[in-house]
Every structure is written in structure tokens, then in C-alpha cells.
Amino acid sequence: MTDVSELGAAIKQICEEKGIPFASVIETIESALAVAYRKEFSKKGYDIRAEFNPNNGSSRLYEVLTVVADELFEEYEKEKELSQEERDEILAKEREEAKKKQDAGEEVEKKKRFNPKTDITLTEAKKKKKDAKEADELKTELKTPTGYGRMAAQTAKQVIIQKLREAERETLYNLYKDRSGEVVNGVVQRVEGRMVFIDLGQAVSMLPPQEQIPRETYYSGQRLKVLLLSVAKTNKGPEMLASRAHADLVKALFSEEVPEIGSGEIEVKGVAREAGSRTKISVKALEDNIDPIGSCVGQRGTRVQTIIAELGGEKIDIIEYQEDPVKYIISSLSPAKIISVKLNEKDKTAVAEVKEDQLSLAIGRGGQNVRLASRLTGWKIDVFKSADEPQPDEEAKEEGEEEKKEEKPVEEKPKEKKE
């Protein structure tokens, strides 16, 4: 095997291991060669570019000059004649004007100045290339060195390592940036205080305390399904936040577990959740021959039980969505039986009437049932006991009167006459 084939194989291996595009690795090598040349031959500030051929391992180096207007060179010559204080004064005025524009919301363009190391005037450029115009780049090939010094080689190595890391971070960000809102499988990598770090395979996501299910414990190696909330680009790579407490996690789990939801035959209309305790989810069938609740529950409850197990035993109420708000509110307050519902369209409030034995069931422990029903339907719901039922005081009064009726009068004995 030749050195060239070994080099090509090494580049391909790096691309496969890091998931980096081949072009990015070549670009990194070219950047490192240019940096090494500038370091070795004291070309700091010059626009040096390299072209690397991965097929034979050869490289070519160029010095690049950008064509600019002659007026910029004239301004440059005039500024050279000024003192340092005068130059500083000009720069201060330019910064002040730029700040005023920025404060006014105007776009601020950086003033272009002639740089003798990277720029060439249009007049001079036409001497080298007749059809040259502004913004063109003129390349002059440089003699490729047979080797580089220790410092230049070390610099090139550092550039390659840094560029490869940047390319790897960019690849990871591109891989996950469009996956916000998806459920992903992960393994708990480590737990630091209340912060949990989830290994997603190619990247690590954070599970902050506020996104954890209350009273759920986490340990290294534990397999979890999490909802990917956000993916942000940072200097250290993509920063990802995951959630176990978000209502959309339940929605996404149902979409995975129930084929009819995944295919669009059943639509999830709303989810109201108190993580770790209870969830209410409303579903609607988009086809007449489908039972939305039955499909979500599954045969012998297999589908919903799988989701409940994933959420650590969290209770789930599946409700059929109704266009009629009264019917929808009645369904959302299940398992309580509702007598009637009165709506106030203006304030979007509703009053639900129940029998006395259904009152605590409708309200729920700590008001949870009616609270979740309100979130699900979008109506503020108040629950009252039916006015038709006899009140406790009235009941006691009626019972007392009945007892009096049932009591028989005591017959008095006739008094004996004294002689």
C-alpha cells in the first residue's frame, strides 16, 4: 500500500468516525497548510490559500489579491501623511456616526480601507489581467516548500484539530436542529445534583429539574424516552434540552404507539397534563368507521398501558373530542356524571351541575379533575351541587316532621275523685 492510499484511507476513516463531510476535511487540511506557510515565511496578514489534492497528496499555494477601486488607494496615501492623533480622530468620528445609525435602527456597513497586503487597485490589476474588474481575485502561485519547520508544523496540527472539532460540532448541530418536538430514545449518562444528562447516541442532552417528572428517580444506564425541546448552537457544540414533563411528550408517545394517529386517521385535539399524576387527552376520528378511544386504548388496553408504563404509572384519561362545547365539557369531566352545563360565551366560563355523590369525583383530589378539564377544553369550569336535591337542613326538618306524624298521642288516665 502506498503513502498516498494510506493518506486517502486515513481521511475517509476520520470522515466516517466523526460523521464529517469529506469536503470539510480537505478544507481543514488546506487551511492548515496556508497557516503553516504564513508562519514559516513571515507572511502574516497576507491572503494565502492552499489547494490540496487527496488523490496524490500534492498541494499548491497561492497569494490572493482582491481588486479594489483606485479611490481607496488614494485615501490610503492621504491617511499615511496624517499623524497618529489625526488618524485616531477620524476613526473616532466614524465610530460615532456608526453608533448613531445603529441607535436609529439603520444598517451599518463597515468602511472599506485599502490593505496593501490583500488589495490591488483596478489600474494595477488591469496591467496583469486586461479584463479585471472590482471584487475580482488575482492569484499568484507560490513556490511550494519541501518541508516546514517545527513551529509551523505544530501550528498546522493545532489548526487541523480545531477545524475538525468545529466541523464535528456543525455536523451534530445539523443532525439535531430540525428534530425539536420529537421523541428520542436515550440512556442516562450521569446525574449531577438535580441535573440529568441523557446520551442520545451521537450527542448528549440535558434534562433540567423543571422538565423532570416529580418523584421519578434517575440512575446511570437507565433507558428513557424524552421529548427534544430545543437545539441551540454554541461554541462547545449543540446544546440540547430534553423534557419528561411536557404535555407534548404524551402526544408524541400516542403518535408512536397508535398507528391510526401516526397515519392521520385520528387527530389529537388537546392534551392537559400534570406530570407524574394525571393526563387528559382528547382525540377525534377523521373517518366514520374508526373508534378513536378504542384505537388509543388498544386490545385489552395494551397500547395505553405501554404509554402509562413509560410515564411511570401516570393515569391517562382518553376523551372523545366534541364540537359542541357542552358535550365536550361533560366528556372532559369524566369519570364524573354531569347533570347539565351552562355556558357564558362572553367570559368563556361554564357551570357544571352534578349530584351530591358526584361532586368530589368531578372536582378531583385537590381540584385536579376540574383543573385538567378546564385546560383541555379552554373553558373555565366551576362545579356545583344540584339545586334540586334536598339540602341537609331541609332534610333534617322533613325527617323531624315525619317522626312527629308517626308518634301516637299518649292517653291520659282519668283522675280519681277523692271522697
Image (cartoon, rainbow, N blue to C red):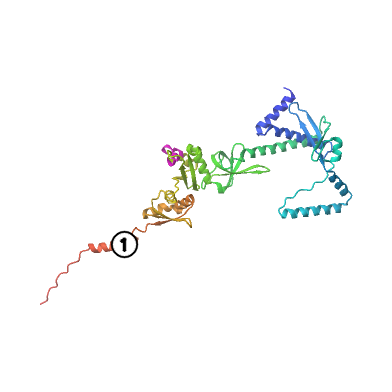
Residue 317 position within the rendered picture, expressed as x and y whole percent measured from the top left? 44, 45
How far across and how far down the image is residue 48, in percent? 80, 37
Q: In this view, does 396 lie to the left or right of 80?
A: left
273 vs 1, nearest the viewer: 273
The residue lying furthest to the right in this view is 81
In percent of width and height, residue 82 lies at 88, 51
Residue at 80% across, 54% down: 93
Q: In which quarter of the image is residue 298?
A: top left
Crowding at dot 1, Cα within 10 Å, few <14 / some 14-19 / many 20+, comes out as few
Relative side of 192 to 40, left or right? left
| Residue nearest the viewer, comparing 213 with 357 | 357
Report the predominant secondary structure element of the magenta stretch.
helix
Horizontal and vertical percent position of residue 153 = 78, 34
Tell me which segment is drawn in magenta: 292-303
Q: Which amino acid type is shown beneath numbered disc 1?
A: Ala
Q: Does the magenta stretch include residue 371?
A: no
Residue indicated by mark 1: 396
Q: Report the quarter where the C terminus lies.
A: bottom left
